[in-house]
Amino acid sequence: MALVHRFLNGAYIFRHCPKPSASCPFLGTRFADYCSSSLQKPVAAPGKTSSQRNSEGDLQGHHQREVALDITSPEEKPEVSFDKAIKDEIKDHFRRLKDDLVNHWIGPEGRPLHEVLLEQAKVVWQFRGKEDLDKWIVTSDKTIGGRSEVFLKMGKNNQSALLYGTLSSEAPKDGESGRSGYCAMVARSPRGPFERKRAYDWSQFNTLYLRVRGDGRPWMVNIREDTDIIQRKNQMYSYFMFTRGGPYWQEVKIPFSKFFFSNQGRIRDAQYQLLLDKISSIGFTLADKVDGPFFLEIDFIGVFTDPAHTEEFAYENSPELNPRLFK
Amino acid sequence: MSWAQAILLARGLSRGWGGICGAVLTGAPFSQVPLQAPRGLHCSAAAHNSDSWLVPPWPEPRKGPTKALTLHEELFQQTLEGARDKANFVRAVQNFGQHNVHKRGHVDFIYLALRKMREYGVERDLAVYNLLLDIFPKEVFRPRSIFQSMFIHYPRQQECGIAVLEQMESHGVMPNKETEFLLIQIFGRKSYPMLKYVRMKLWFSRFKNINPFPVPRDLPQDPVDLAKLGLRHMEPNLSATVTIYQGLGATSFHPSSSLQMPSSRDSTGTADPTEPHIVGIQTPDQQAALAHHNPARPIFVEGPFSLWLRDKCVYYHILRADLLPPEEREVEEIPEEWNLHYPMQLDLEYGRSGWDDYEFDIHKVEEGPVFAICMAGAHDQATLAKWIQGLQETNPALAQIPVVFRLAGSTGELLASSSGLEEPPPPEGQEEEEDSQQRQQQGQS
């Protein structure tokens, strides 16, 4: 990614600075998941650096962050050597390519085939260290001019991730938005060597499992499929996750058959089943129109096969809305 | 600009440029346009009556509010003296129809009414939405030929109808047969508002009951009732008991006697109303765990944490202990002969045989046991100390155990452990321990 950044921005890259998203605002699309700046991990004090930084003062932003890092955290000395960073990235990519080729001989994703076929429960994302937080992008409606704030940090004893912030449904005064107020946390799509797109294959599982601890607010879980077709970039499958609140950990099991299809944020008339063989990312959104602080603590996210669940798809297509499907 | 204002502008244009300046710049509603507009250069000589220009080139600065009233807003201004409630809103809406037989500007009026609904508190009232839809003239906007139905017939009105339905959707109001009939009468069966109505019916009925932890829409106003609702919401164990330690309906407790005497309503009426309420919940399992707790280890009162019920945020505190290190953990095994009627421990698993393994390959986050939860009106140590005293009635073992108060600010986040770099350490940690030991000594004496 350092190569890409260099060509786009001409700025120096540190190991710890947020990666892909400075390029995304240039694309200009509003759909928040891939297109806003990622979180600056609060090193010393939470909430010190805002989670949303657009690319306006990108160079200045880098210098500011450099200054902030110097003052507040002596243990992370950023290395300014550009050539070393490039060399490290190249070596990293070649190493990943070599691993990829070798793993192909062992089995899918480097595990023997019998292990993969018999697997019935798999942990996909866990939060046991700071590097696990790097796999997530956190956005809020600040990208369209709203006032919600959201931050992501490690929770107690580095055993869970805490997503917290304030939701504000004050609409931005830009003349075209009527409503506002959302916060989201999206996973980055898995990448192979040289940033090739990869996808998750969950075709043998049928339920999503989340171990969370919330504050009673209803969240929405969105799953995006991996696709190269531009029109499909805004399509996703969603379902609701209701948190109970309270001090006890909550296990949320959502079967994949319950996810409904939506395009550009609107639910579609023609509903199709979520196909699990090319999943690109998962996301959590909070947009329940209630202003105030919120938090969500996540332990891990996994997928498993629920043998008691035999439903294939929960939503029928209605002949009134889709006459063409019923001819 | 609505079509009414466009007609106004056309009228002004026909009377001359001075007419435009006068009508548009002053921003007056069209009913107040002076009938005698000054003449421009292009008008005929016959209409030339007066010699002077009546319109000043720029309006004088207003002393009142700088925002000009939108069209028809005076209908809502009239009810300013009265209360902002449903009757006044309905009256304002009906006044629009009375002043205006042809219902000019109904689209703008409906948008205005939709904006005003929240002030009048009627945004979840289906009858009011039906009344708003009733403002539309019927049968005029229905397409009559195939070409009219191909293109969006009367697009502004259809957008307005969709806006009404969208506000219904965002407040969770389910439309009924009357809405359907009105929409068919106004827009026809193939129109966009009707399509939106069909979608609302479908998806609302699909998602009506998907919340596994439903919260009633009308939350109780009394803080004690709200606290009880919140505590029952959080605690999954149905055999938990809710106790009100302070507040309406509290049971009075005497440290010396072993009997708990419920106080009558009269005495709670004379209780100090400025005292914050304290409501707690505890399950029998938690009581047993607290009784077995090792007095050498302190227990902590942590909080406040936030809980959202619909749109109200309440705060709760918990009483918990730290996790025991693995060597001190003992697993109590209840022998099978203890109860012959039903098994005390049931191990139902999905696994069909040795090859089935539905466990995740991760060490789940383990935290120390929670002994009780409470919701109090105030978040300071004195109130929580009263809670602990109340808990001591049902858990006499609590008197021996040191209690440490770890109260955070109101960020709503869960506290880090004591070695966390990110949170500042609790400010009065040392003082709390001394206080708790004093209390412990008082409890023992």
Image: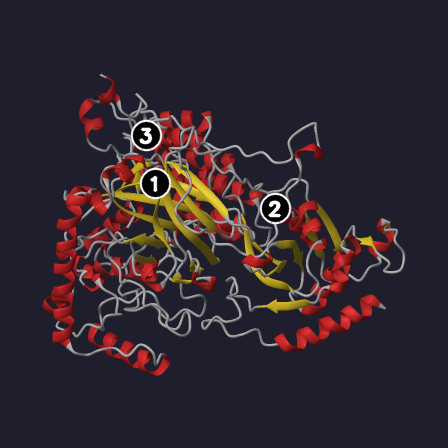
Instruction: Specify the label residue A238 is tagged with.
Output: 1
Which of B425 and B100 lies nearest the eye of the viewer?
B425
Q: Position of residue A200 (x, y in %)?
A: 25, 44
Q: Is residue B75 above or below residue A270?
A: below
Instruction: Identify the chain of the residue marked 1, using the numbered disc in the image.
Output: A
- Both on one chain, marks 1 and 3? no
**Which three-letter amino acid code belongs to the residue tagged 1?**
Ser
Q: CA distance from mark 1 to mark 2?
A: 28 Å
Q: Is residue B105 visible?
A: no
Instruction: Specify the label residue B195 is tagged with.
Output: 3
**Which three-letter amino acid code belongs to the residue tagged 2?**
Glu
Instruction: Identify the chain of the residue marked 2, using the numbered disc in the image.
Output: B
Which of B143 and B299 lies nearest the eye of the viewer?
B299
Which of B354 and B236 lies nearest the eye of the viewer?
B354
**Which three-letter amino acid code belongs to the residue tagged 3?**
Leu
Residues packed near mark 2 inside 10 Å, few (<14), some (14 to 19) or many (20 plus): many
